Amino acid sequence: MSEPGRSGAPLSWQLCALCGRELPLSSSQSQCPDCGGLLEVRHRPPSVSGAGTTLQETFASRRGGSGPLDASGVWRFRELVLPGAREVDVVTYPEGNTPLLSRDAVARWAGVETLLLKHEGLNPTGSFKDRGMTVGMTQARSIGARAVACASTGNTSASLAAYASLAGLPALVFVPAGQVALGKLAQTLAYGAKTLLVRGDFDACFALVREAAEKLNVYLLNSINPFRIEGQKTIVLEMFEQLRFEPPDWIALPAGNLGNTSAFGKALREARDLGLISKMPRLACIQARGANPFARGFREGFARPHRVKAETVATAIKIGDPASLDRAIAALRLTDGVVTDVTDDEILEAKAVVDASGAGCEPASAASVAGVRRLVSEGVIRPGERVVAVLTGHILKDPGLLFRYHQETEPPPSRANRPIEIDAKLSAVEEVLGTARP
Ligand code: F0G
């Protein structure tokens, strides 16, 4: 896949971040064969002079392009994603090109003057996972994988199912039985993945898929897959482009298995090294209080890894033993980042505010906004600082939770918008609106 550069050396390769072992780009290993560490994709720096400015111009010139690569908000950035990718191998919808929204009501609630929402729920399958999946599935096809698999809390499985269908590959997914939001499970089934409802939690699903992938020779597309990370980096690159490469002070994101935190760290490191940005934003990683191993570790300076039995309404991030912990710690150190946790009530209130602003998002996504409010109240984020919060999934991913929230009566949640059943008569409408004539 990687076309040799002019010197004959490959454009890209894989590297174990722990022991430094190098593997060819075409290796299908899901971790380092020597030490078990997670792999990372490395690219030769783009061979352009004045790299930062020239790259900015190249990316901008492709925006709105009609070719399959230029139309994608991932492959537009291909020099930093997979420079040697051949167009025939690329599996794309297209994806990305998501908006950066400004909603005053959300900023006011969070307590900051400038809060922008990078809405990744507006990807083709409704979550940021599509950005990683287009690259992971492209790699699967180019190395001749016979099938693809993942464990998931729902969004990865929906994305994997859709992209596998696009690539013409069989897909196998492992999800925790009874713990996946309705929209995500429905998508996974409808796109045609073989769907295994595992009696256990996400962490059990993940252990099982790792074993199955190795023994059954299927290609693993969880976020430990380094090609997924390359795609997810483009959330940050595209955000910078939308901000004319003037980075915000903070980027807030929900944190579960920590693949996205890792991707953001890698994007930021590379953007700085290439001269795309001259200031490093700080990462604010937000977990649910009942699924907070990363936040616990942060409070103790990561003296030891934590593992918890996860419990939260935000099922997307209901993860007790995150797989990409080391990479995420590196991202925090690079950016002088912080980790905090928020309660389910805070998540639900943030979600109601985001939803009522018209932006809308799924529960896990609202954790990022709830986290901004908490960090402002703790004096970590100052009200005058510029913040981007990433909304990772679409409002329709979890309709079950929405109906429970808005119809709950004992007691009704503070921002519930209860539906009102009426007879089919104008007088009934007038009565509800309080305009009935005497
Ligand atoms: N937000 C949403 C909507 C997610 O679906 C996920 C993860 C995250 C945030 C956290 O990202 O795991 O990279 O730290 N969902 C995975 C899945 C686990 O299977 O769909 P992370």
Image: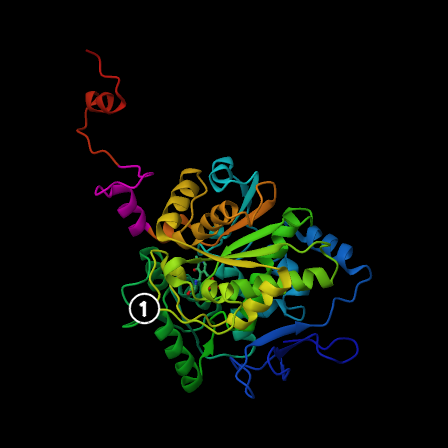
Measuring from the top left, give residue 130's x and y in whole percent.
Answer: 50, 60
Residue 125 position, x and y percent, is 44, 56
Residue extending furthest right? Answer: 49
Tag 1 secondary structure: strand
Q: Quadrant of the C terminus?
A: top left
- The residue lying at 66 percent from left, 76 percent from top is 2
Q: Is residue 410 magenta?
A: yes
Q: Quadrant of residue 152?
A: bottom left
Q: Quadrant of ligand 1?
A: bottom left
Left or right? Give the position of 209 relative to 277. left
Determine crowd level at label 1: few under 14, some 14-19, many 20+ residues with C-alpha closer than 10 A: many
What's the residue type where badge 1 is placed? Pro
Q: From the viewer's perspective, is residue 328 above or below residue 415?
A: below
Q: Quadrant of the N terminus?
A: bottom right
Residue tagged by mark 1? 176
Q: Which residues are magenta?
A: 399-418
Measured as percent of width and height from the top left, residue 53 is found at 77, 54
